[in-house]
Image (cartoon, grey):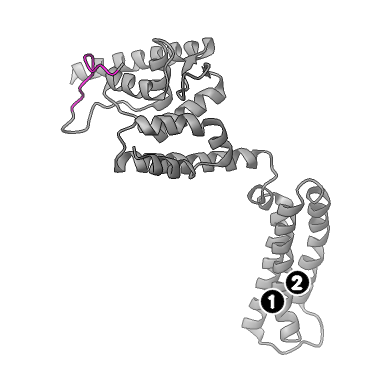
């Protein structure tokens, strides 16, 4: 295989993998006859190693993907989306007129918004010290979901 | 090392007959002694007619090393030879025994057809 191509293809692999196998793999590529099939095989191998290395990191529970799938990350987002659905459903059925008394929809919305606060706090307290950056990303999503569910309430002055 | 004297020639027209379980093929190749990557590829072609791509080969090598079934030897020039470990030999023996049992049962059923 062409030396330059071999060198480029190795850079498709994760950094850790290259540190361990890069040099010997390059030697194997130089001895290989190359071709389109071999190139695709290397690309597929590199993708597989990326998936493997990210799943290994996930198994430690410290990546954004792993944290975002924690129940304490998902529940607040689900509650915010449920609250948003309640508001939108109410608007669809009864319009945007403000009610004199707080109805069932308002109470459900309030319960959903207040109920997620302890879960959100639990998530932040547990994960911020261990993995600050991915935890912050998840918190941004959670806050975004909260703002999305609050937006129609303030926008329509319900 | 590059001899093709014992190369198995599967049904190349139909593409049938190729066996592809890269980790098992690498273990089987190393059962006859330590080899580096390119030598393993050629040896596996001789064993069963399957030519592993470099990405597939090194995927299998990395997995087997992680499992402790093969281990690296001191490098020769820029080549990295590997050898099978005792645990690797045990695994290979067990897998081949299962395959033999499977092949025997499958062929017996074919005889009945």
Asked whether A132 or A140 is in front, the reply is A132
Is residue A18 left or right of B58 when viewed as pictured?
right
Query: Please, what is the dominant secondary structure of the magenta stretch?
Result: loop
- Chain under disc 2: A
**Quadrant position of the N terminus of chain A in the picture:** top left
Q: Residue at x 18, y 21 (%)?
A: B113
Asked whether B55 or A91 is in front, the reply is B55
Q: Residue at x 52, y 12 (%)?
A: B85
Pointer 2 local density, CA inside 10 Å: few below 14, some 14–19, many at least 20: many
Q: Position of residue B70 (x, y in %)?
A: 51, 18
The mark found on residue A109 in the picture is: 2
Find numbered disc 1 in the image and state the secondary structure of the residue it sits on: helix
- Residue A111, image quadrant: bottom right
* Earlier residue among tags 1 and 2: 1
Residue at the farthest bottom position:
A97
Q: Position of residue A86 (x, y in %)?
A: 68, 73
- Chain under disc 1: A
- Residue B15, image quadrant: top left
Question: Distance between the Cα atoms at labels 1 and 2?
Answer: 7 Å
Q: Residue at x 70, y 45 (%)?
A: A62
Pointer 1 local density, CA inside 10 Å: few below 14, some 14–19, many at least 20: many
Evaluate if marks 1 and 2 touch, with contact meaning CB atoms under 8 Å apart. Answer: yes
Find numbered disc 2 in the image and state the secondary structure of the residue it sits on: helix
Is residue A18 left or right of B45 when viewed as pictured?
right
- Residue A27, image quadrant: top left
Residue that carries the numbered disc 1 in the rendered image: A87
Q: In this picture, which residue range is highlighted in magenta?
A: B2-11
Is residue B66 left or right of A8 when viewed as pictured?
right
């Amino acid at each position: 295989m062409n030396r330059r191509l071999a060198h480029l293809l190795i850079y498709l692999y994760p950094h850790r993998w290259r540190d361990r196998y890069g040099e010997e793999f390059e030697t194997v590529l130089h001895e290989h006859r190359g071709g389109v099939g071999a190139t695709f095989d290397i690309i597929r191998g590199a993708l597989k190693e990326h998936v493997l290395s990210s799943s290994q990191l996930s198994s430690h529970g410290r990546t954004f993907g792993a944290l975002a799938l924690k129940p304490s990350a998902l529940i607040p987002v689900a509650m915010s989306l449920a609250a948003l659905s309640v508001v939108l459903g109410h608007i669809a059925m009864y319009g945007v007129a403000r009610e004199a008394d707080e109805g069932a929809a308002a109470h459900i919305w309030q319960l959903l918004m207040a109920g997620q606060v302890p879960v959100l706090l639990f998530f932040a307290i547990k994960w911020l010290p261990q993995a600050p950056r991915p935890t912050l990303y998840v918190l941004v999503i959670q806050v975004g979901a909260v703002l999305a569910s609050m937006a129609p309430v303030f926008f329509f002055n319900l | 090392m590059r001899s093709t004297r014992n190369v198995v020639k599967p049904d190349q027209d139909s593409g049938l007959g190729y066996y592809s379980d890269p980790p098992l093929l690498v273990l089987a190749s190393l059962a006859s002694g330590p080899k580096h990557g390119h030598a393993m590829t050629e040896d596996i072609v001789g064993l069963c007619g399957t030519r592993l791509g470099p990405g597939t080969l090194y995927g299998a090598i990395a997995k087997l090393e992680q499992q402790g079934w093969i281990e690296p030897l001191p490098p020769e020039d820029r080549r990295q030879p590997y050898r099978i470990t005792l645990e690797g030999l045990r695994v290979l023996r067990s897998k081949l025994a299962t395959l033999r049992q499977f092949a025997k049962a499958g062929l017996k059923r074919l005889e009945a057809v």
